[in-house]
Amino acid sequence: MSHRPQLALLLLAGMTLVVSACASKPDLDITIHKSERGAVFVERIPDRSFQATHPMTVSSDTMARVLRGVILKDGRGGVGNLALDKTETIRVFGDDDVEYLAPLLVEGLTRAASDQQVGFHIVKHGTPARSPSAGTVFCLSDVRFPGVCESEQVGRGASVEATGGSLYSYERSLYLTLTGYRQRTERTDANTIADRPLFNPTGLANRTVHFIPESAKRPDSYRTAHSTDTTLVIDYSQLATMPTGSDMRSTAVQPSKSAKEDSAQRDADLDELRKELKEIKKKLTEQETERTRQPPSTSPK
């Protein structure tokens, strides 16, 4: 019996799997901008039955506030009140990221159709890292560009970290989804990396995505079938009318409330100790002055 029909079936099955894997990813339609810093592009929503509210217009200032409000929290605890939570919070987008992304995302939303969404990447260039303990290195082209991953790692010493996601509007809400945070990959041509979507949702394990101010975040009832654990639903109209003091401005890791209280307590203790030492020194000085003023005593007859 010939094995050629079986071999043909196996080849056909393999090609079908590759084609279906590629088809499940969003199709790139429009490149808004790409550079060494990252890329913003309009892509097709994988679910062809879903219709977003596009095109839409939002101000760059409001978009900047949306990006500044995206934070990550360590652990999987309850949401609670972020102001009272003792876990560390990290701002996902720094001020330079916000300055780069905000106007480009606004342009993407004005050019997107109802079956499209806006994708984005932010790329941070790092130094060479070859240590095995440095973590797993992913190749961004392993799905859309099969066979390229191996060649990318030849002769390339430096690495980059990429943060990516997607954004669309639906019924007066912005749906922002993070697909990766500081995902590490081998460094190839900067424009090539910036132009590829992130397929590995790394950097988000054991972390939850939140938004500040919380009052501008929609309740869970607004989440759609396309929402994931890393999707934020934001009332951008209400956010635009809120005072800017409610935004999270610091890009560094925010210290927990307990650490602040400990620091304040230590400062108070030091101040109290300084006062006590000052009083003791004053008393010693007074005693020494009084002793020198007393006349020498005479022995009794």
Image (spheres, grey):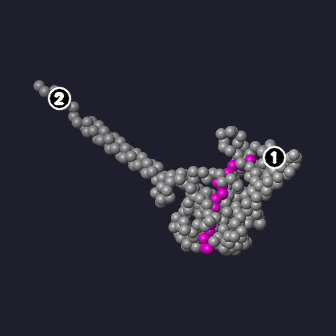
- Give percent across and percent down for residue 9: 82, 52
Which numbered disc covers residue 151?
1
Q: Nearer the viewer, mark 1 or mark 2?
A: 1
Q: Is residue 78 magenta?
A: no
Visible residue check, residue 158 = yes
For residue 105, side relative to residue 188 (left or right) = left
- Give percent across and percent down for residue 98: 65, 62
- Give percent across and percent down for residue 82: 49, 59
Visible residue check, residue 182 = no
Which numbered disc covers residue 298?
2
Q: Is residue 180 magenta?
A: yes
What is the quadrant of residue 18 in the picture? bottom right
Q: Relative to the observer, which residue lies in front, 269 or 143?
A: 143
Task: Name the residue type under label 1.
Answer: Ser
Q: How many marks?
A: 2
Tag 2 or tag 1, which sits nearer the N-term? 1
Span highlighted in magenta in the image: 171-186
**Residue visible at 67% across and 63% down?**
166
Distance (Cα) linking label 1 and label 2: 104 Å
Q: Relative to the observer, which residue lies in front, 195 or 255?
A: 195
For residue 301, side relative to residue 294 (left or right) = left
